[in-house]
Each structure stands twice: as C-alpha cells, then as structure tokens.
Image (cartoon, rainbow, N blue to C red):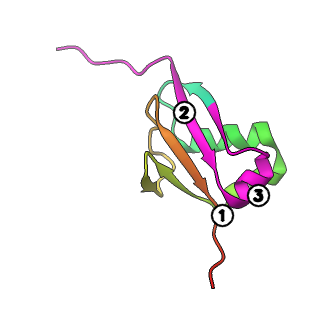
Amino acid sequence: MGVTAAPSTTTVRVRFFAGARAAVGHDEETVRLPGGATLHDLVADLGGRHGAGLTRVLTACSFLLDAVAVRDTSTAVPDGATVDVLPPFAGG
C-alpha cells in the first residue's frame, strides 16, 4: 500500500463577510495554493494579494473550513474546500 501524495496545487473557494468583504471589494474568490497548504498559508496569501487593509482585518477574523470552525491555522486546507472569513460581528 503506497502513500498518497498531496496534490501539486490546492484550489480553495474563499468567501468574505462584513469587514473582510469591504476590505477586499467582493464576496468571494478562488485561490490556488501549493498542495499541502495550511490555513496560515491561505491567510498569508490573501494578505499579500489584497494589502494592509485586509491584513489588519484578518488578524481579528475567525475562519470556517467547510462550515466547521477552525482555530488552529496549521490545519491543512484540502483541495476543493470552502473557507469563510468572518470578522467579529457587533451585536446588540
């Protein structure tokens, strides 16, 4: 039985909400990362492409990976996953 290698690229659907959406200027995008990428890699890629405004927002965000809350940014992001970027919401 052989070991299955990670795909050479990972395609991720990223959906932005509230302040993250405002910082990016759109609701969602598709991101291609190297195979075996983590949530940390995705966040770094997003900040690098969208600049300081989004980077500031990302520091306060929480993330859903395929509808499951993820706090550990070393979590691998599988090919075809959806990541929701959720800034803190004000409540009342």
Asked if residue 47 is positioned above or below residue 37 in the image, the reply reads below
Give the residue at x 55% y 49%: 84
Residue 28 magenta-highlighted: yes
| Disc ID at residue 12 | 2
Residue 75 magenta-highlighted: no
Asked if residue 60 is positioned above or below residue 38 in the image, the reply reads below
Closer to us: 46 or 23: 23
Give the residue at x 59% y 41%: 14
Q: Tag 1's secondary structure?
A: loop
The quadrant holding residue 15 is: top right
Q: Tag 3's secondary structure?
A: helix
Asked if residue 42 is positioned above or below residue 73 in the image, the reply reads above
Q: Nearer the viewer, mark 2 or mark 3?
A: 2
Identify which amino acid the numbered label 2 is placed on: Val
Horizontal arrangement in the rendering, residue 4 relative to residue 64 (left or right): left
Horizontal arrangement in the rendering, residue 67 relative to residue 1 (left or right): right
Give the labeled residue for mark 3. Answer: 56
Q: Quadrant of the C terminus?
A: bottom right
Q: Residues within 10 Å of mark 2 (few under 14, many from 20)?
A: many
Please say if the residues under marks 2 and 1 sit with CB atoms less than 8 Å apart. no
Q: CA distance from mark 3 to mark 1?
A: 7 Å
Give the residue at x 22% y 14%: 2
Give the labeled residue for mark 1. Answer: 60
